[in-house]
Image: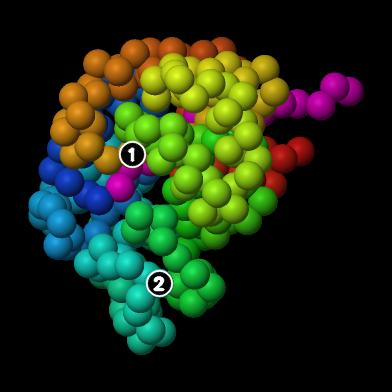
Amino acid sequence: MAETKHKIVTTSWDDGHPLDFKLADVLAEYGVNGTFYVPFSNPEREVMDSVSVVELAGQFEIGGHTRSHVNLRRIGCDLLDDEIGAARLELQDLLGRPVNMFSYPKGKHNELARSAVERAGFIGARTTQEFITECCSDVLQMPTTLQACPHSPWIRVRHSLLTKNLKGALRFSRIGVTKTWAEIARCFFEEMLEAGGVWHLWGHSWEIEEYNLWDDLRAVLDTVASKEGVIYLSNGQVIENMTKLST
């Protein structure tokens, strides 16, 4: 029997900005699933209030993103347990359901942070590592395919090198550093359709607004939506089904 090549589309969106509602409407329009990672506060920008978080949870998976959007590399174990574990319990109490996924703020984490995520009971944690379409081998290091942001090629390559993602940097170089983010997203999607795997777009609703990327996002979603043989999952569903999807 021929090997099944699972083809998965997932998205994720950080920071819990009020513009997440606009983003959720766009995703729903195209039938694309995803996870919204929400902190209780963020010193850098506005976040949704509790009522809004509950409302958004009626449409999409909600994940943990710390209590106050801190740099997890700069705090000790007690604060880590509060920012990650205690915040998860509060979010679960608010939503009345388990919160299974976590996203490291700005992707910054270390072994202490990873251990705190594991202690807190999350089933998976998403990083900001890019240019990956394979199903993740480490549930607490879930990679992504691309950030929906017009970063310069240098910033993307630099980030890949800092996160020791040499394979990703080489894939990005091969696809074409001169392409726009939307073109890169579509190229990786075509590769995923051919080889199977997980196409994972992530970003921030406030950033899409700031750079006026709504039309680009719609064009990308139009490319990836409603494809025969493609499964559209939240981040948590990807992790929950890893064993099934890898066979």
Vertical placement of residue 150 versus 130, above or below: above
- The quadrant in which the C terminus is found is top right
Q: Sort mark 1 into few (<14), some (14-19) or many (20+) by Cα contacts within 10 Å.
A: some
Residue on which disc 2 sits: 73
Question: Of the numbered discs in the image, which one, if any, rests on residue 35?
Answer: none
Residue on which disc 1 sits: 203
Look at 56% across and 13% down and name the residue there. 228
Q: Position of residue 135 (x, y in %)?
A: 63, 41
Q: Which segment is the magenta one?
A: 1-14
Would residue 43 be found to the left or right of residue 57 on screen? left
Vertical placement of residue 19 versus 109, above or below: above
Q: CA distance from mark 2 to mark 1?
A: 21 Å
Location of residue 98 (image quadrant): bottom left
Q: How is the image coloured?
A: rainbow
* Residue 13 magenta: yes
Q: Position of residue 234 (x, y in %)?
A: 44, 40
* Residue 59 magenta: no
Look at 13% across and 43% down and name the residue there. 18
Q: Nearer the viewer, mark 2 or mark 1?
A: 2
Task: Give the amino acid type for the residue marked by disc 2 in the picture.
Answer: Arg
Task: Give the amino acid type for the residue marked by disc 1 in the picture.
Answer: Gly
Q: Secondary structure at mark 2?
A: helix
Q: Secondary structure at mark 1?
A: strand
